[in-house]
Image: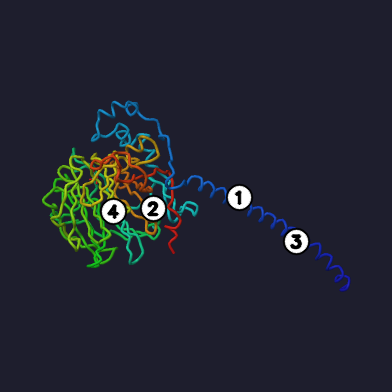
Amino acid sequence: MAMGAGSKQPRSLAIRWYPARHGSFTLIVWCLAALVMLLILHLFISRKVEQIVRGIDEVEEEAFPVKLARSWRNPRVARRKGEHRTLPVVDEFLVESSAVHHAFFPEGEVTMDPVNGGNDRRYLYYPGRVWLDTDGKPIQAHGGGVLYDEKSETYFWYGENKDGKTYKAHDKGPDRVDIVGVSCYSSKDLWSWTNQGVVLQGEEKNLFHDLHKSNVLERPKVIYNNRTGKYVMWMHTDDANYTKSSIGVASSDSPTGPFTYLYSKRPHNCESRDMTIFKDDDGKAYLIYSSKGNSELHIARLTDEYLDVTDDMRRILVARYREAPALFKSGGTYYMITSGCTGWAPNTAKAHAATSIMGPWETLGNPFVGGNEIYRSTTFFSQGTFVLPVAGLPGLFIFMADRWKPSDLRDSRYVWLPLTVGGLPDEAADYSFMFPLWSRVSIYWHKVWRLPEKSYRVT
Ligand code: GAL
């Protein structure tokens, strides 16, 4: 019996074993098919991404995304309104319920998200989308600027934290949010930002403090002083009616703060509203501010510690009504992007250039390329705040701008786009004859773009 059973065993085993082997074979075939499908899907997605990410300086034309009210199509209306008035299309954009508004403040899933965004979307910039930090919260760094800290080889993005309710201090006042403070975010790749907290706090109680929450703190910028080892922050401080028009200064031993608020003043006894600071290659630093009812800009050298202005000041772009200055240097020439003066409403930006930082400064015209006429005349529905040189890639800059949302300022968006310098400018220079001294500043519209790999593959 045992023998018989024994002799049968291999047969019955073989019979039982065969379907199992058959099952594994089928499983293997399915696995292989699934792998091939995944590979095809991956190739398809990455090809799609490659197709939408064009070369940085490729001209990307784009139709206006929605139908406009009739007023924009009448060029006489636009001309009659003049440069300091908003364009009809902008009036439409500012109405929260309008289709134009919705097109430029996309909601829902359409975010830049370093945690849940998916690998195929990493390092892609989508101007105007909600941009999340590494905690999954919208970045609060409006009117800001970026410092590249050589010691830690890290970028720090400082800006206005506007995470509060938008309201008007009085009927005719501009929309505002109480001062929360200056936020700081850190990044190695300029795309994925980690919240370092509010590094300069607004003041809750003391009504007489410059940074009392009922006041205004705008456009903070930070530079590092190699001599003193301090990180120095300059900002626009004001009252709710913008009548104090002063600068404020703070400093810290660390880029992530806390920053100690030092004082405010009117530089050179002049009004000072929109402003920026710029550190030159020789270590000298400068303050640039809109003054005299925003009709002109002033540029002044800072003291060696960067804690005050010197008396060395020049008035530039006089009677041009420019604000939101963003200064940078390329190939030994100084360049600046400014906006017109229409509050939170977007307007046409201009590029300017100078061989000496103290001037004379000349206007080169509208720097924008691509998109469409409306995009180019509205700074792609945003206002500049900073021009960031990309470390390790000379000649490549990022134009940083804010797409302000006056109905809910905390949900204002960021528009980051590539900026290059080269080619002939559009407008003849004021002070040169016949031949242009300057190169063209070009800021390229892209629905989606990314930096050359070299700049973000930081190890
Ligand atoms: C803009 C300025 C912003 C803010 C706003 C208030 O002209 O650039 O920084 O001050 O006005 O309406």
Task: Answer above or below: position of 321 versus 398.
Answer: above
Q: Secondary structure at mark 2?
A: loop
Lower sequence index among marks 1 and 2: 1
- Asked if disc 1 and disc 4 are in contact, CB closer than 8 Å, the reply is no
Q: Which mark is residue 132?
A: 2
**Residue where numbered disc 3 is placed:** 21
Image location (x, y in percent) of residue 142: 29, 50
Q: Which mark is residue 427?
A: none
Look at label 2 and name its amino acid: Leu
Residue at (25% x, 30% y) in the render: 81
Q: Secondary structure at mark 1?
A: helix
Tally of marks? 4
- Asked if disc 1 and disc 2 are in contact, CB closer than 8 Å, the reply is no
Q: Foreground: 137 or 430?
A: 430
**Residue where numbered disc 1 is placed:** 40
Rounded to the nearest whole Å, what is the CA distance between mark 4 and mark 2? 15 Å
Q: Foreground: 259 or 167?
A: 259
Lower sequence index among marks 1 and 3: 3
Rounded to the nearest whole Å, what is the CA distance between mark 3 and mark 2? 50 Å
**Residue where numbered disc 4 is placed:** 159
Lower sequence index among marks 1 and 4: 1
Q: Is ligand 1 less than 8 Å from the beta carbon at label 2?
A: no
Q: Residues within 10 Å of mark 2 (few under 14, many from 20)?
A: many
